[in-house]
Image (tube, rainbow, N blue to C red):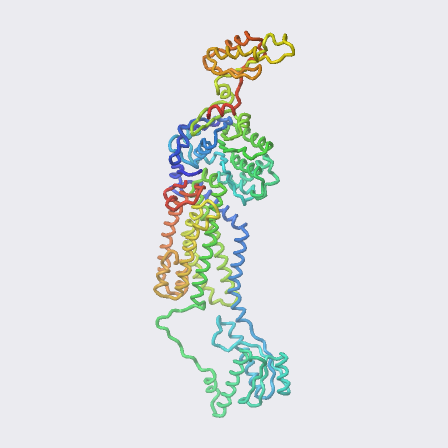
Amino acid sequence: MIAGRRDPARARGARPGIGHDPRARGTVAVVARREIAVTLHDRAFLGSTVVMLLVVALAVAIPAFIQGRTPRLTVAVRGSAAQQVVGAATTLGADAQKSSSASVFGVGQLPGAAITTRPVESTAEAERLVRDGTVSAAVIGDDVRTLQVIAAGAVPDALGSLVEAASAQLQVSAAAADAGLTSSQLRAMLNPTPPTTVLLEGTARGPVPPELLVVVFAFLFSLSVLTFGVSIAQSVVEEKRSRVVELLVAVVPVRWLLAGKVVGNTALAVGQIVLLLGVGILGAAVTGRADAVGQLLVGSGWFLVFFLLGFVLLACLWAVAGSLVSRIEELQSTTVVMQVLVLLPFVAALFATEPGIVQTTLSYLPLTAPLLMPERVILGDAAAWEPVVSALLVLVFAALSVGLGARLYEGSVLHTSSRLKVRQAWRGEGA
Amino acid sequence: MREGLAIDAVTRRFGDRLALDGVSFEVRPGRVTGLVGANGAGKTTTMRIIMGVLAADSGEVRLGAQPVGLPLRRRFGYMPEERGLYPKMKVVDQLVYLGRIHGLDGATARTRAEALLDALGLAERRTDVLSTLSLGNQQRVQVAAALLHDPVLLVLDEPFSGLDPLAVDLVSERLRERADAGVPVLFSSHQLELVERLCDDVVIISAGMVAAAGEAHALRRAGTGRRLRVVVTPPHRDARDGGGSSRPLLDPLEVELARVAGVTAVGVDGDAFTVDLDAGADAQVVLATALRHGAVDEFGAIVPTLAEIFREVVR
């Protein structure tokens, strides 16, 4: 039976908070270090970090891999026109391959391909080679207008486009030569200059699509807050269940304990996020998407600021979710509220990927700001003062939440017999 | 000389129930004090109030002349009733952590933790995770946690429960060592023989009040007033054939003893009489009475055991 009030002298001593007692910082650091050491030895934490790193690495590598993969095609050729067209297609394919590595998304261009020609004597031989798979397709014909492409099931996409383009080019230049056009007129026909686009209300967009940014930031933030939040709550219950808390509160103000837990877990969470962002940015640099790096760095800087504030905003409340119960099995009943506080903003952010009034509003609300404001900064949708104001708002709410969390934690952490209601914790009935 | 702990008129209520009612006693420096009482008598509540885990409604706890607050408590050693260690931490890491919470630096905490584990016979288990230790061994770790920071006061709630006799000896040696170094040591226990063997002073608490307190042997002498044991051999017994019972011959003695002024009760067990006296009774009159009925083989005061006193005072 541990119901009852706490020592008022202690409560008074703790009230001024950390910084007034020279021992406070050291003690908070000792508590924080234990939290970190325990988490770093936790296989589940290490496992999930590795998985997240792999996801980031794959997210960077897969598009690069897909783009960088050039189909290798062998084409059987019979006839002079066929030879000419396939030759031109080979050049086009090789050019496309070179240019695509320089741009991030090679959409709207000719596909890259490495084409090898294999001259054959007869159509029958070409068909045999196609059937047994020695060649991807065969191109046959002496006249450019009656060319035949033979394939088994379907003509490979890249080959089809390249051969089509090559044949068109050859026919156009033949027609142009017949009409007596000059070579510069011919070039103008073959490489028409596209119109220049002028956007009156647009802003410069980076190469990373905005929807993806929102999803990535929202996902990282929510996942991290959920993982570490549950870990904070569990650590609190663990101390209550094993009664270590009784030993600790005899010598350390309750608020120092809470501060140590929050500091330790925040340091770990920020460390993990920095690692993930670092891998992502490094990956972008290595895979030749250097133009995205600067954009990501700025966004990541703001993301870290909002991440830190948003994390602290929720961390103390997670500790309260732990201190209201006495057993791990009861934890679900209190953490479900916290899960809603994390998942609701996540869903809201997913519905607000497009710039607009909804996104702007949400980027100022404390729970959704960490998810949306960094993206607005990256896209240039936000004026310079906007993230600062929004960050200050989150900071104010974080301070309020820390105060609330500390009081509820203090009021409930020594109560080890049953689940407490928030109101009882507020009145200190559990201590 | 170290200072003693004084609990001064401490009262504490849980709702309607008065758990402690003006509890006052002292834990003197250099002495081991046993706190005994029935379940729910208020032992754990008293200790929690000393450690500040609970607040007193009124009354005060002082070390020497100084009211006990957080900075002072940091130097107390405490072993809570329900224990308190991290199940998943390694034994030595755990002790180092608690030592640092108590204000030791890391290196000192480690050195002391290893020395204590050695002294408590746990040297080879020091890198094991706590939950893999037997309950008795976990208890030893708990004792180590209370001793680690060289406390100026020890408060141990049931430190011996669940320990085997060897561990009891190890732990009681450690407590005696600290007391000999001048530290006031307070522990609670249900094992009254152990308290009797180990304690210099005893505090008996009953229904939230101190029922008796003082030096253990003085308490035993004073506890139930005076009790005499008298063994008498009646004069004609040897003359009778084959012995037989001497009872009928001693019946008049029993009647006469009961009539002696100040005798409150007379118990008979064969030849042995147990005579309870009140404060005004004269033991010599009892002896003279016995002599008139035969040869007095034994005559002396009975010192009750602590268990007997305990039953007496909590009744």
Residue B73, above or below B230: below
Residue visible at 47% across and 90% down in the picture: A181
Q: Quadrant of residue A135?
A: bottom right
Nearer the observer, B271 or A281: B271
Residue B175: percent from the left, percent from the top? Answer: 54, 30
Q: Residue lying furthest right in this view?
A: B242
Residue at the spot 40% in from the left edge and 29% down from the top edge? B21
Q: Nearer the viewer, residue B117 or B16?
A: B16
Query: Residue A204's x, y, as percent?
Result: 40, 69
For the point 53% across and 61% down, the residue is A54
Residue A65 drawn at (x, y percent): 54, 69
Between A330 and A50, the one nearer to me in the picture: A330
A280 up-or-down from A194: above or below: above
Quarter of the rendering containing residue B116: top right
> In the drawing, does residue B21 fall left or right of residue A39?
left
* Residue B147 percent across, percent down from the top left: 53, 34
Q: Looking at the image, how many numbered discs can be counted on the residues?
A: 0
> Seen in the image, is B185 located left or right of residue A355?
right
